[in-house]
Image: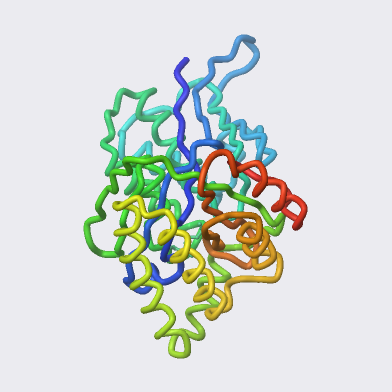
Amino acid sequence: MSISYAPAKAILFGEHAVVYGEPAIAIPIHSVETQASFVSYDNSDQNGFKIISPNINMNTSFENIPIEHPLKKLCLLLQDIIQFKHFPEKALVINSTIPIASGLGSSAASSVAVIKAFSEEYNANLTTQGISDIAFEIERIYHGHPSGIDNTVVSYNQPVYFKKGSPFSKIDLHHQLNLIIAYTGIHSKTSDSVEEVRKHFDEYKEFIHDIGLITDEGKSALLDNNIQNLGNLMYKNHMLLQKIDVSCSELDRLVEAAIAHGAVGAKLTGSGRGGNIIALSPSKEKNAEIADALLNAGAKFVLC
Ligand code: PMV
């Protein structure tokens, strides 16, 4: 049995603005992940294709999964693309340590891990771009009008500079970033916050453009490994996200706590109004102090 993996993701710069054609930068996060595998039944009274996904309380035979469920849609889409006649007489087991609805790309990771598992099971040799394109179709069911950044970074498993409608570019990082992720414990729906920004687009236009400029500066700081500048830009990006009203007091508290305890920068990551922040630590040695401060400031968990 082989297991397929997909990482989580964090947006380093440019969330929301990316929906309007501004650039964004996202990176894979490996401390949490989704796994998918086809498991044969060891008991002869089990048969048919079923999906077991404890994170969403699913242990259901395929025919009993509602047709509108994104996982069902994904499997049917894959049947169409890979062109196999029957689903295997096996269980598709999906396990994930990525918190859902928190801006860490859990839906994209689930799709990518499942697509890879099917590709492996049927020797389909799907390309990485093929995997990303299929995951994008499912992201549209979860999120309405996604930019495509989540499926891209999770499929390629590499930092990406992404602009909707243009080919993305991979960013080769020569130094590891000491990023700390802290979770507010608040679930938020990407499509809701994207919709709220859309309603006020005329009012937010300038801020959205400024986020794009910061992303470009952030790309240079990343390539130069200028950690101080990178941190400053992350914080500036956070202040602009406050202006487009996608932050909240819990996120702001975590950002301020990280900076007060030595992070060179911090910002919310993903769609906001809950979910996570990312903080940039100046060195590995400083991670524990920043992580403690985040827990004291209300983080429900911290990933280093
Ligand atoms: O799904 P999240 O919370 O990781 O947010 C995705 C980033 C947005 O820019 C808010 C939406 C998008 O489609 O790019």
In this view of the protein, which residue sits in the foreground, 122 or 132?
A: 132
| Residue at x 58% of width, y 70% of height | 192
| Residue at x 45% of width, y 36% of height | 6
| Residue at x 29% of width, y 59% of height | 220
- 191 vs 240: above or below: above
- 192 vs 139: above or below: below
Q: In which quarter of the image is residue 173?
A: top left
| Residue at x 45% of width, y 45% of height | 177
Q: Position of residue 99 (x, y in %)?
A: 63, 46
Q: Quadrant of residue 218?
A: bottom left
Its colouring scheme is rainbow
Q: Where is residue 97 in the image (x, y as percent from the top left)?
A: 61, 37
- The single residue placed furthest to the bottom in the displayed view is 203
Q: Considering the image in quadrants, where does the C terminus appear?
A: top right
- 114 vs 185: above or below: above
Answer yes or no: is residue 67 visible. no
Q: Position of residue 231 (x, y in %)?
A: 47, 60
In this view of the protein, which residue sits in the foreground, 227 or 111?
A: 227
- The single residue placed furthest to the left in the displayed view is 167
Q: Is residue 143 left or right of residue 259?
A: left
In this view of the protein, which residue sits in the foreground, 191 or 123?
A: 191
In this view of the protein, which residue sits in the foreground, 179 or 125?
A: 179
